[in-house]
Image: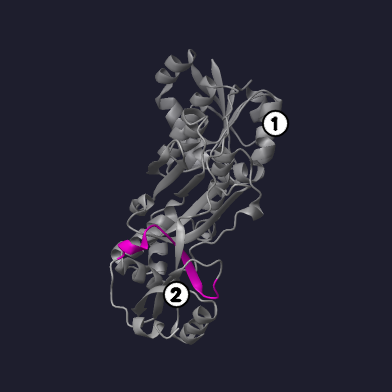
Amino acid sequence: MLRVGLIGFGTVGSGVYERITNSKDKLKQLLGKEVEIAAILVKDRQKQRTADVDAFVTTSWEQFCNKANFDIIFEAIGGIEPALSYTAEWLERGVPVVTANKKLVAEKGQILEGLADQHSTYYGYEAAVAGGIPIINALKGTLATTAISRVSGILNGTTNYMLTEMIEHHRGFADVLLEAQELGYAESDPTDDLEGFDAWYKIRILSRLCFGSWPLANEFPRKGVSAIKDWHVEVGERIGFKIKLIAEAWHDGTQVRGSVKPAFLTQTEQLASVRGVTNGISIEGESINQLLFIGPGAGKEATANSMVEDFLFNERTKHSERGWGVGSEVQNEQLTHSFVFLTPAERETALQWVKENQIAVMDTYSHHEGEGWIIERTDSTPFETYPIYGDVSTRRRVEAIHSAQFGSF
């Protein structure tokens, strides 16, 4: 008998319970023993969601710990504490822990992996990144010896849904945010999504898997989507550019760099086709060129499935480690141009700025709320600016009402 302890019984926790309960025969066939959920730790016993559960349910940590000699713990409560203390306790006992807690993994993963190694067990976190996409164990398993130079992706389904609606249906930011909350894609407090924290946690986890070390938080700058104006999206859409929240990490020859930021993708970029709440991850390296993973980034069933599959993967490959190798260095050569957006009041200052700094302006686009300029990439600008990924020559040319004036620079 393989005894399971489940910490948390919200959306993800209940999904894990259902996934294990509904696949007991298959799990027995694969593991050679029956699987039993021996105990569930919940925060509030008054909630009715555990009424029909065939397992011991408690709000007491002590009762939970003493209920059984657990063989595996599934942690599904989120946040740092008490998840960190709970996870550390079981790893120190030599019991493996599988989690979907991206914040905990990103912030404390180095400590928890160290405990797992020290006590000859494992810490699984496949479900912490991109929900149903098996990217973590692909990196650990199928791509275990593959040198990787860059990982990038659309890692937040909420913001991708919002931006897709704004692009395809010309809707306003506030309108689609309200709908995302009504549909359950965004929380009542959507800060983690809108300010890029969710994608930031995930890209730091992917960076560790791709390049072998946990990045410090201050090494990966973060910018969310809250500053995006409706007319920025509209101008981009008119010329065939799609705005996305892009998380990426790459090796520049000396160190790993990374970021989370909104960016415009041209028609040549594969991630431009990732719509709605779907996530997409691109892995690049000399021997693989580019691999693209697309699938559900969240959801009860997808996340629970990833947790159970993570457990099975680790049971079959206990104590294996990815053989990290860094591919040829990348200097972020994909970024050759930027999109600058100017209000009417900023136009004269911008004209002077490009002249003084000898910035080449490739194209200009007019909107009743301002102007969008495509410029050669520069390290920083005093205006609202987005990087452009891909070949800008593929854009659809629309009216450019200021082209003649740029000749006077």
Visible residue check, residue 209: yes
Q: What residue is rendered at 45% in x and 81% in y?
A: 343
Disc 1 to disc 2, C-alpha distance: 48 Å
Closest to the observer: 162 or 352?
352
Residue 221: x and y in percent read 59, 58
- Quadrant in which the C terminus is drawn: bottom left
Are there few (<14), some (14-19), or many (20+) residues within 10 Å of tag 2?
many
Q: What percent of the width, then of the height, locates residue 74? A: 56, 32
Mark 2 falls on what kind of element?
strand
Amino acid at pointer 1: Leu
Q: Position of residue 166 (x, y in %)?
A: 35, 64
Which amino acid type is marked by label 2? Answer: Phe
Is 62 placed left or right of 302 in the picture? right
Q: Disc 1 vs disc 2: which is toward the camera?
A: 2
Mark 1 element type: helix
Specify whether residue 394 is painted magenta: yes
Colour scheme in the image?
one colour
What range is drawn magenta here? Answer: 381-395
Residue 61 visible in this rendered orientation of the protein: no
Residue 208 picture quarter: top right
Q: Nearer the viewer, residue 298 or 22?
A: 298
In-front residue for pair 401/60 = 401
Q: Circles 1 and 2: CB distance less than 8 Å?
A: no
Looking at the rendered image, the quarter that the N terminus falls into is top right
Look at the picture and state if 41 lies above or below 165.
above
- 297 displayed left or right of 61: left
Q: Position of residue 94 (x, y in %)?
A: 67, 24
Residue 239 vertical position relative to residue 320 in the rendered view, above or below: below
Residue 358: assigned label: none
Q: Which residue is mark 2?
A: 341
Looking at the rendered structure, which numbered label has been put on residue 115?
1
Who's the residue at 41% across and 67% down the image? 173
